[in-house]
Amino acid sequence: MCGIVGAVAQRNITPILVEGLKRLEYRGYDSCGVALHVDGKLERSRSTARVAELEKQVAEAHLEGFTGIAHTRWATHGAPASHNAHPHFSRGRIALVHNGIIENHDELREELRAAGYEFESQTDTEVIAHLVDHLYTGDLFETVQLATKQLVGAFAIAVFSRDEPHRVVGARRGSPLIVGIGNGENFLASDALALAGTTNQIVYLEEGDVVDLQMQRIWIIDANGKQVEREVKTVQAHTAAVELGPYRHYMQKEIFEQPRAIADTLEGIESITPDIFGDKAYGIFKKIDSVLILACGTSYYSGMTAKYWLEAVAGVRTDVEIASEYRYRDSVPNPNALVVTISQSGETADTLAALRHAQSQGMQHTLTICNAATSAMVRECALAYITRAGVEVGVASTKAFSTQLAALFLLTLTLAQVKGRLSDEKEAAFLKEMRHLPAAITAVLALEPQIIAWAEAFARKENALFLGRGLHYPIALEGALKLKEISYIHAEAYPAGELKHGPLALVTEEMPVVTVAPADSMIDKLKSNMQEVRARGGELYVFADGDSRITTSEGVHVIRMPEHYGLLSPILHVVPLQLLAYHTALARGTDVDKPRNLAKSVTVE
Ligand code: F6R
C-alpha cells in the first residue's frame, strides 16, 4: 500500500527519502516519486518503475535539497501512470503526498475547478494539493488544519510549500503517520521502518493530529485543535530483518523463519496465565461469555481455526467475522463478548474500523493478536498479544499466520483455564507440544524437495481445488489463498463434505485436488470424499500424516508429514501449502514477493 517519507534538515535529504521508499517497497506499489525544495522552487521526479529507477533519475537530475517529501503509490483513483504518481503540485507552490482515500473528492474537484484550478491527474490526492493552495494563508500549518476539516475519508498527508522552505506539515485521520526525531532535523513517515538507520526516536501521531515539522522543533495540534505533547518512543531498528540473506525471495525466507518466529512468539511462556495478554486480562476473561473474532484475509483464516479450538477446548462460543462485512452490518452487540482482532500489520483499515464499530456498540472487552507492537490496533485494544514473527516483507503472509495460530492457541488455553476447563496435566502436555513446534516445523520444511516436484505439475494448471475438514478446513482456505495470490492460478477451498453439494461438478482429469489429510477423527470421512474425486478422474495431492493410511497410487500423490500433531496440526499443515504456492509461483515466473494488484498493508478500505 502507499508509503510516505518526508524530511526537514540542514543537509541533502534525497538519500534519506529514497532509502525510506526502498524500505517501504515491500508494502506493494505501482509508482513512486520525490519532491524537493530547490533554490526557491519545487522540483520533482516520478516513475512507474521501481524505486531503484527513481533513484537513478534523481541522481541524473542532481535533485538535492534540505526539505522534501516522497511517496510510493498503490493506485486507487486513476491508473498507475507518471501523471498520477505523487507528489502532486498545485500552481508551483504546494507539493503534497497522500495515503488513503478522500471520499468527497468529486465535490471538492468541482469547487476547485470553479475557482480556476486545472487538474493533471485522476487522483483524489491532487484535489487536496489544490485545496491547500486555495486556502493558503502564508502559514502552511494553519492552512493544513483548515484544509483537513473539509476532507471526508481516510488520509495521511505530508505537504510543503515553495514559500516556507524549512517546513513540512503532516496530518492523519484513518491512515498511519509517524514523526522521526533527529538532531536538528526531523522526519515524517507512514511507518517507522522507513526511518530505520536514520532515527529510532519515534512519535506515533494520533487520529486527527496535524504536525508542524521544522528543523529544531515539532509542534502537534490534536483533533480538537489543542496543542499536545506526544510520547517519544525508542523503536528497535529493523534494518537486519529486511535483509534477504541467502534466500531468493522474502516469502521463502519467511517460510523458513517459522521455527524461529514461533519460538520467539512463545518465548518466556513457562505456564498459562492471563497476564500474558495484559494486566487486566484476568478480570476481562472472567467476565466474558463468548468471543467475536474480526479480521481480514489470512488473519481471518487464523481466526477460523481458533474458533474450532476455542469451542472445543475452552468451551467458549466463538463467532468469526470478516471485518469489512461486520463493520457495515446491523449485528446484535453483546457487551459480554471478548472482541479479538487479528492482524499482522495492526493497521488494516477494515479491521480497525470493525474494532471501532464494536466499541461504539458498547463492546469494550477488546484484545488484539498483532505483529506490530506500536500499531493502532495495539494502541486501541484493552489487551494485546504481540506475535514475534518479525518484519514480514513478502506480500503473501506466512510466518505471521503461523505465529497468530500459536498466540490463538495460548488464548484458547488461557480461556480454558479461567473457565475451569484446563487441568494441570493438560496444561503441561499442551505446553510441551507447543515448545516442540519449532522442531516439528523444521522437519516439515525438509519436505521441500518433494513439494518442488509437485509444483512443476501445478505450474501447468489454471485451476485447483483444496479440501480439508474440521480444523483443517481453514488451512485448506489459506492454502488456496496462497496459491492464487502469488501464482495467479484460480484456487478454491471447500470443506470436503461440501464437495457433493456443488463443486464436484468442476472435477475432471484437469483438476488437481489438494487434500489436507491428517490422521484425526475426520480421516475416514475425508477418505470417502477423496474417493468421490477419484471416481470423477480428479488428481489428488494429499498431505497425510501419522497413521492416515493413505498411499500413493494412480492419480493419488501423497506426501507424508513427519508426525501427527493433534490439535496443533494446522500449524504444521499450513507449511507445505505455503511451499507449494511458493514453488508453483516460482515455476510460473511471477513476482513472488510483490504479486500484481496486491499490497502488504491494506490501509484503505
Ligand atoms: C494474504 C495476506 C492478506 C492479509 C490481510 C490482512 O497473504 O497477507 O490476506 O492477511 O490483508 O492483513 P493484516 O493481517 O495486516 O490485518
Image (cartoon, helix red, strand yellow):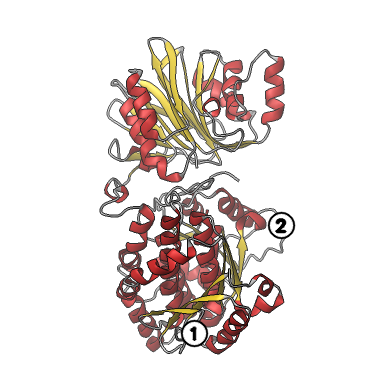
Please provide percent x and percent y for residue 201.
Answer: 32, 39
Query: How far is disc 1 from disc 2 in space, using C-alphas?
Result: 33 Å
Crowd tier of the residue under label 2, counting other residues whose Cα lies within 10 Å: few below 14, some 14–19, many 20 or above? few
Q: Which residue is mark 1?
A: 421
Q: Which of 14 and 75 lies nearest the eye of the viewer?
A: 75
Q: Position of residue 534 (x, y in %)?
A: 58, 81
Q: Place residue 164 in its image quadrant.
A: top left
Is 259 rendered above or below residue 517?
A: above
The residue where tag 2 is placed is 329
Q: Please tell me whether mark 1 sits on a helix, a strand or a loop.
A: loop
Quadrant hosting residue 506 = bottom right
Nearer to me, 340 or 189 = 189
- Residue under the image location 31 percent in, 28 percent down: 15
Q: Are marks 1 and 2 in contact (CB under 8 Å)?
A: no
Q: What residue lies at 46% left-to-right and 12% top-to-bottom? A: 163
Residue closest to the eye, 583 or 108: 583
